[in-house]
Amino acid sequence: MNLQIRAKDITLTDNTKDHIGNAVEAFRKYSLDITSIDCVVASEKKGVMVEFNIKVAHANPVIITQHDEDLDAAIDLAVERATKALRRLHERVVSHGAESLKDLEVVDA
């Protein structure tokens, strides 16, 4: 999993980068084939914007955008929303792969 953090019109501290990195490591528990994660942190008129672009193999990318006045709050809310989206994707993949029609036995009457 490749993590790229970009900042626009804002300076990120090492503590903030570590906070994002540790939060992204929690995404591994869903056993999805996450190829890369692009995180964009940008300054806005009324706060900051945090965007996660999570690219999953064999699925559409998960894009989460969160606006807030506080940087840490925006990161935490974006991580919560991304966790929810990845959990739903994982459940969808697991439930669809449970049993196929080819695996069912034919019962003669």
Image: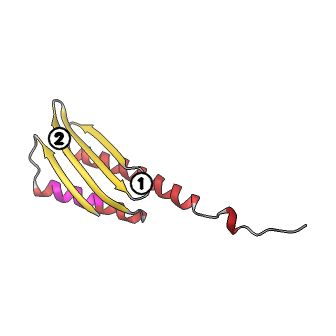
State the residue at coordinates (54%, 61%).
94
Q: Earlier in the sequence, mark 2 or mark 1?
A: 2
Quadrant of the rendering where the N terminus is positioned? bottom left
Q: Is residue 15 magenta?
A: no
In which quadrant of the rendered view does residue 33 lie?
Answer: bottom left
Disc 2, SS: strand
Q: Position of residue 4 (x, y in %)?
A: 20, 56
Left or right: 77 as drawn, with respect to 7: right
Q: Which mark is residue 42?
A: 2
State the residue at coordinates (16%, 56%).
17
Q: Are marks 2 and 1 in contact (CB under 8 Å)?
A: no
Camera-side residue of 64 and 34: 34
Q: Position of residue 87 (x, y in %)?
A: 45, 55
Task: Inspect the image, locate mark 2, and give the three-letter code of the amino acid beneath it.
Answer: Ala
Q: Which mark is residue 86?
A: 1
Is 65 situated above or below 3? above
Camera-side residue of 71 and 8: 8
Q: Position of residue 101 (x, y in %)?
A: 69, 62
Disc 1, SS: helix
Is 100 situated above or below 63? below
Camera-side residue of 23 and 100: 100
Q: Which residues are magenta?
A: 16-24
State the residue at coordinates (10%, 53%).
13
Q: Which mark is residue 27?
A: none
Badge 2: few (under 14), some or many (20 or more) residues near its Cα, within 10 Å? some
